[in-house]
Image (cartoon, rainbow, N blue to C red):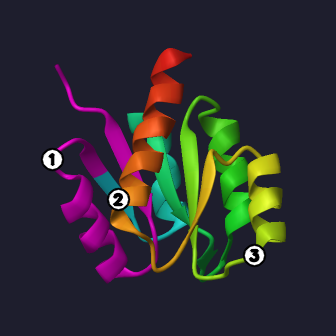
Amino acid sequence: MELPLLMLIDDEFGVRESLKMVFAREYRVIEADSLAAAIPQIEESRPSVVLLDLLMPKTDGLAALQQIKQIHPSCAVIMLTGINSQQLAAKAIGLGAFDFVGKPFDIVDLRAKVSRALEKVVSK
């Protein structure tokens, strides 16, 4: 059975590499350093779950979330951010994000959230 596909979208190479190491055993992992680089991959590969950095150069994370959900509505998007804001989290959830995780993130918690997101996608 093929592993589920997880996409990492973050402008920081170190964050992508760390996340890749965390998830490489349970998921096929693809990555992009910008929304522009991610869109063609999302259209072609249709990842089950996307981890999306909220703050990237030249990209509004909430607008990126909307664009991803427009292209691939069944994809579960988990927002990653260094800004711990309940208002921002509520807005992201309202726009279709599955969850909102603050940086630095707890790996056990993040793994659990990705697993729950995948369960939701698979059960659709």
Marks 2/1 in contact by CB < 8 Å: the verdict is no
Place residue 71 in its image quadrant. top right
Q: Secondary structure at mark 2?
A: helix
How far apart are labels 2 and 3 at the CA level?
Answer: 21 Å
Image vertical order of residue 75 relative to residue 108, above or below? above
Report whether 110 appears left or right of 80. Answer: left
Alpha carbon distance from label 3 to label 1: 32 Å
Can you tell which quarter of the image residue 92 is in? bottom right
Viewer-side label of 3, 1: 3
Circle 3: is it few (<14), some (14-19), or many (20+) Cα within 10 Å? few
- Earlier residue among tags 2 and 3: 3
- Tell me if I can see residue 81 in this picture: yes
Q: CA distance from mark 2 to mark 1?
A: 15 Å
What is the magenta range? 1-29
Residue 50 belongs to magenta span: no
Q: Please, what secondary structure does the residue beneath circle 1 have? A: loop
Quarter holding the N terminus is: top left
Q: Position of residue 18 (x, y in %)?
A: 26, 72
| For residue 64, above or below residue 72 | below
Q: Which residue is mark 2?
A: 108
The image quadrant of residue 4 is top left
Three-letter code for the amino acid on which mark 3 is drawn: Ser
Residue that mark 3 sits on: 85
Residue 68 spot, x, y in % from top left: 62, 46
Nearer the N terminus, badge 3 or badge 1? 1
Q: Position of residue 110 (x, y in %)?
A: 42, 58
- The residue shown at (47%, 48%) is 113
Tell which circle, 2 or 1, labels the residue nearer the N-terminal end.
Answer: 1
Residue identifier under label 1: 25
Which one is closest to the eye, mark 2 or mark 3?
A: 2
